[in-house]
Image: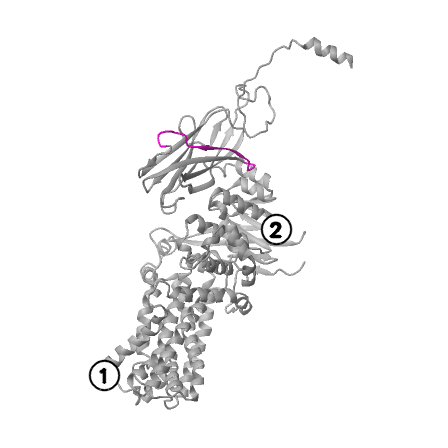
Amino acid sequence: MSDLAIRVEELSKRYTIRLPGSQHDTLRDTLTDWGSRLFKRAWQPSGSTSERGHSKFDQFWALKDVSFEIKQGEVVGIIGRNGVGKSTLLKILSRITIPTKGRVEIHGRVGSLLEVGTGFHPDLTGRENIYLNGAILGMKSGEISRKFDDIVSFAEIDKFVDVPVKRYSSGMYVRLAFAIAAHLEPEILIVDEVLAVGDGLFQKKCLSKMQDVGQQGRTVLFVSHSMPAITRLCEQAILLDNGSVVKKGPSHDVVSAYLTSGLGTTAVREWDDPEKAPGGEVVRLRAVRVRSEEGRIADTIDIRQQAFIEMEYDVLRPGYKLMPHFQFYNDEGIHAFSAHDLDPTWRGRPRPVGRYVSRVQVPGNLLSEGTMFVGAGLQTIDPVIYEFYLLDLVAFQVHETQGGGDSARGDFAGKMGGIVRPMLKWSTKVSQHFEVSLERQSLI
Amino acid sequence: MKAPSHVIQPDTSLFHLDLPALWHYRELLYFLVWRDIKVRYKQTVLGVGWAIIQPLMMMAIFTVVFGRIAKIPSDGLPYPIFAFAALLPWTYFSEALTRASISVVNETHLVQKIYFPRLLLPISGVLTPLVDFIPAFGVLLVMMIWYGMLPAWSVFALPIFVLLALLTAFSVSLWLSALNVKYRDVKHTIPFLVQLWLYASPVVYPISLVPQEWRVLYSLNPMAGVVEGFRWALLNKESPDFAVVAVSAGVVMALLVGGLTFFNRMEQTFADVI
């Protein structure tokens, strides 16, 4: 099992980006730009050409001298903030783009899932798309035929196999896409944040399928923003920042290094483009925020103080009864609790179109120290349809200033375990039965 | 340590045609073509009827405009059949060229998310319209019977000219599809290019109208050889100028090798630029 699966040596990728206002998307622009550069050069032979010729292009290294090795059978997570090169790395490893420098050795058949449902055609039926998408993901048609029934039952679309997928509900569509992906069995599996869609129950099903994949001795490379998923699925993790490897090691260590470095947590997620926001035709999520007792956006909350989690969303179609809810997970991936909207103002009442903010108060002296990951979901009731359900959208640190003595810690100074740390009522009194029990002891 | 099954590094080779990879991905090619055929006439009333209506309409227009009004000669053949025998490869060619040239950009999604030899895209672009060729060919046979003509043995040479048309469309689309990734202008010039090319090929007029001293220059257009070859193979017209066909084939080979080189250069940045 100590054979190498992937060796990455000093891998670098440079992108040339165009500064705003200098788009070269048409041939005419390129030609006129060449023209004007020639013209400028002719008229201004001194150094000033660079002012126009080069400043419009900026080069940046998405990856810089990245080296690491992954052994066969290892399940490795890649973490880091947005834009530090995680996707570029996966794209190079999946051979979608080539590196500028460096070298990668791959031992084994690679399957990559940078997205689910790539190449789905809306006019084709579920059956046809299973074959098409399977082929796109690199499965042989014999293999697809063999797994066909499993895929259909996994996706729970039995009755709709011969219906064009454009008639599917968004949930069915995503389930089918996942089901095909989940049945991919390469020797090396490369997975990007694909588990961040679909409803919660189905996500669980996919995660456990992925876990099976890992246990069958296959090598898995997994990019995720979900620290619980990383620690649960991966033994090893790689932390990237600014295109370089910052830390590699057991995933628990790397995740905690990431979280304590302040790179990981984010108290706000906002979607500026409603088209890309989570949700569908009825509701779109616009923001999720963590606020402190004073109402400021905060990623650190004192253990004794209350916090507010809020979601802002647009209702696009009137007449639906909606139920927003939040899910709280700790950094070991343990589901601490869920909270469902109980406010009678809109509970069970059809809502008109508009923007809403739903906010839940998390009391002080409830959570344990550490990082809390908050997921948000929203469903309609009668019938129950998930509009969106996303884990780990925001996170906050529950933090305790030592020595106050007014928290559940009491006078203890060491590390306290547990998911919650409520202030509970204690009573300690002198017992009347002291002498009785002593007598009993002496009899023995 | 055994040798890696794959090495990823910057590619500096000038010409690199990975035939084993293409072979490995043959099933994907099959499914891409299969998908395009399936989807092609979905939600149309006439369905595959469009495959024969288009060349038939063109034939009718050409017969009226060029045959009747302009009185362009047709080498002694009835003008409708003269035109249709040329429109058969031409309709295929223009469809193949157009599809293949926009194939890479049309599959932006795949290019950004999945690895496969990018050459599959233009290849599937030129293979898909072959399906339309069969019903249109049937129409030509019916027309020949109508005019009391029987195909000669030369009909067996037809696949050679189909292949030549396919390779012409493919080699030109290698250039255009790669350019289109960076410059979307290409997409807008294709209809114009196809139109121009139609009049530069002996579709509405016979090659005998072209003065002898211009023939060699004229036959640099590979479609001249294709159209002439079709008329010869199907209508038993006097044997074609094989010099024309040979020059056409030579030009196609040059375009093909150049196109493969160019595509190979450009394909490395497809995912970044597209």
Mark 2: give few (<14), some (14-19) or many (20+) Cα within 10 Å: many
Residue A62 seen in the figure: no
What's the image's color scheme? one colour
Where's residue A442, x and y in %?
77, 12
Q: Secondary structure at mark 1?
A: helix
Label 1: chain?
Answer: B
> Residue B80, located in which quarter of the rendered image?
bottom left
Q: Quadrant of the C terminus of chain A?
A: top right
The residue at 64%/54% (across/down) is A4
Kindly report the distance in space between the C-alpha atoms of the residues bearing marks 1 and 2: 74 Å
Residue A209 or A125: which is nearer the viewer?
A125
State the extent of the magenta-drawn residues as a range: A331-346
The residue at 74%/12% (across/down) is A440
| Residue for badge 1 | B68
Q: Secondary structure at mark 2?
A: strand
Where's residue B244, x and y in %?
39, 85
The magenta stretch spans residue A409: no
Residue A240 or A18: which is nearer the viewer?
A240
> Residue A285, located in which quarter of the rendered image?
top left
The residue at 46%/63% (across/down) is B267
Mark 1: give few (<14), some (14-19) or many (20+) Cα within 10 Å: few
- Please, what is the three-letter code of the amino acid marked with disc 2? Ile
Residue sitting farthest toward the left: B69
User: Do residues under tags 1 and 2 come within 8 Å of each other at their CB atoms?
Assistant: no
- Please, what is the three-letter code of the amino acid marked with disc 1? Arg
Q: Is residue A349 above or below residue A423?
A: below
| Residue for badge 2 | A70
> Residue B128, located in which quarter of the rendered image?
bottom left
What is the number of the mark on residue A207?
none
